[in-house]
Amino acid sequence: MKVLVTGGLGFIGSHTVVELQTKGFEVIIIDDCSNSDEKVLIGIEAITGKKPLFEKLDLKEKHSVEDFFQRHQDITGVIHFAASKAVGESVEKPLLYYENNIGTLIYILKELCRKNKASFIFSSSCTVYGQADKMPITEDAPVKVAESPYGNTKQMGEEIIADTCKVTPSLNAIALRYFNPMGAHPSGEIGELPKGVPQNLVPFITQTGIGLRKELSVFGDDYPTPDGTCIRDYIYVVDLAKAHVVALERLFQGKNEKNYEVFNVGTGTGSSVLEAIHSFEKVSGRKLNYKIVDRRPGDITSAYADTTKANTVLGWKAEYTLDEAMNYAWIWEQKIRD
């Protein structure tokens, strides 16, 4: 089985390529390297003993996508990660996000619709729920008006896939709505490589811990939560990668109940920003320099998953704890700064 992974050199993509290769799938990666590095291929090969096929390609170029699928007609499954993903940047540059995240999705789906049978896994996000009315969040929770163009591209992406599946019985798709991915591979060969200022909490914590950043700002301690800071569901990236493989196998084996399904992928446990900081202090043995500042606009109070559907229907469950994931994030941070 040949599987295309778009954005396969990125954080979640690279870990998913490792899990796919470990399961014996033949993998080809497309990445434009706008937010990743070709050196990631070396890490993937070091873990699995096999270098995946790789093409540096811009999915915004329709003719390049058509040409790629023409040359690789034996692709049976696609896991689609390639997208711009910074919430703040999406507010500043909405058209870039719509072009990058929607245009590329349409080009890929058009190619898959030409096949006799195709399986598609979409990288969606818990941002589609906004501030959900109740915790934990189930897949039936209403999709709220998006807080940002980034969030909107995930909502629109899901709608485009659902509409396409309705009229394309040969296309089977699963959208995975994930919560907050973190950590790095236990081997220390691949991990999160944010370019510039990290958009996510955990790399900001580890960069502050190693002295790259002077201090960590905690945005608000007056939220209606036990310690006043925001609550998120931090999922270990290897657990998340495995969920993609399980979802793809579900489609390959024809176990899906409909040709478009949605699953939450999280741990089912909410952790506050301060709990994440204390987890880092515990695994690293270092005090973290942080200060409480004003709330950040657009931040929701709390978001953690009800994972019942993923556990029972998909047959996948997160295995790693916050401390274990944080420890791997810290090992990785130390390695890349050596």
Image (spheres, grey):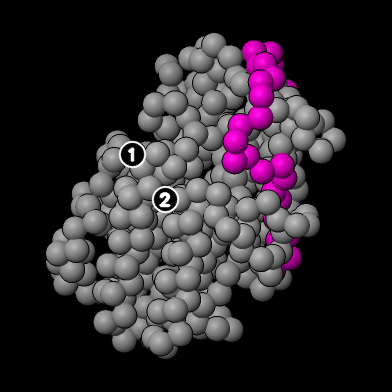
Cα separation, mark 1 vs mark 2, equals 10 Å
Say which element carries label 1: loop
Q: Quadrant of residue 286?
A: top right
Does residue 313 appear to the left or right of 148 in the view shown? right
Residue 286 part of the magenta-drawn span? yes
Residue at image location 66% in from the left, 24% down from the top:
294
Of label 1 and label 2, which has the lower sequence position?
Answer: 2
Q: Are marks 1 and 2 in contact (CB under 8 Å)?
A: yes
User: Measured along the vertical axis of the image, is residue 96 above or below residue 275?
Assistant: below
Q: Which residues are magenta?
A: 282-310
Q: Name the residue type under label 1.
A: Ser
Q: Position of residue 121 (x, y in %)?
A: 45, 66
Q: Name the residue type under label 2.
A: Gly
Q: Is residue 18 visible?
A: no
Depth check, front residue: 155 or 124: 155
Q: Which residue is mark 1?
A: 36
Q: Give the numbered dot on residue 257.
A: none
Residue at image location 44% in from the left, 26% down from the top:
197
